[in-house]
Image (cartoon, grey):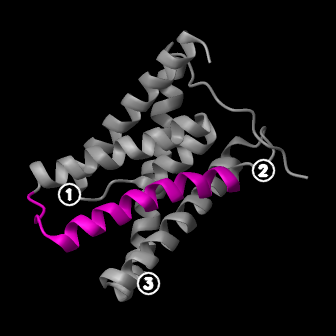
Amino acid sequence: MTRSDARVSTLWIMLLTLASALTTLALACATPFTALAALAATQLRARDGIVLMIASWALSQATGFCLLGYPRDTSTLLWGATLGLAAVAAVVGARVAADRVAPGRVLLRIAIAYLGATIGFKIVQLLGAVGLGGVDIALSPAINARLFARNAAILAGLYLLYRTLVAAGLPAAPRDRPVTAC
């Protein structure tokens, strides 16, 4: 990786982390991890996607505890850790799913990445709910449908922001070569 690539990667990680923090503030505790994961899986290198998810999770936790008054108890801390693991699982799931679609099919890749991100995130969230309580909420069709639609809209907005900034002259984020489907 060149020094220039490293700077561009850092810039995009910072910009997307900031965008997720603003979303967290606007929606009060609803960091769009699955939307970020899908965008990261299709527009960033794998390593940068994981860094983005960890940075977004850390900033989300800081926002919650420092600005939104999250309780400082064991359950909240364990749920925070679970969400961090789920965020990383989301980007891994998104990458695996996106790499099954031909590189030239951008919107399909993003949609499939979003499904993979949602599945990865939900599996870890459900495992956390089994241990921490809240399985009924984690499996609620109404809640899941609302979150899926909201994150899909956020993904569309993030992708539009990304493409607009690139069109305005910001260099595109360096990417790994996608693995093509067999």
Residue 5 falls inside the magenta stretch: no
Q: Could you tell me how far apart the alpha carbons at marks 2 and 1 are, in whole angstroms?
A: 34 Å
Graded by Cα atoms within 10 Å as few (under 14), some (14 to 19) or many (20 or more), the crowding at tag 3 reads some
Circle 2 SS class? loop
The quarter of the displayed image where residue 10 is located? top left
Q: Is residue 105 left or right of residue 12?
A: right
Residue 83 falls inside the magenta stretch: yes
Kind of residue at badge 2: Val
Q: Which of disc 2 and disc 3 is earlier in sequence?
A: 2
* Residue at (56% x, 49% y) in the render: 38
Kind of residue at badge 1: Ala
Using the image, tell me which numbered label, if any, was put on residue 101. Answer: 2
The residue beneath circle 3 is 139
Q: Is residue 75 left or right of residue 134?
A: left
The residue beneath circle 1 is 28
The quarter of the displayed image where residue 174 is located? top right
* Residue at (33% x, 61% y) in the render: 81
Q: Is residue 129 above or below residue 119?
A: below
Q: Is residue 52 left or right of residue 74?
A: right
Confirm whether residue 130 shows in the render.
yes
Confirm whether residue 67 shows in the render.
no
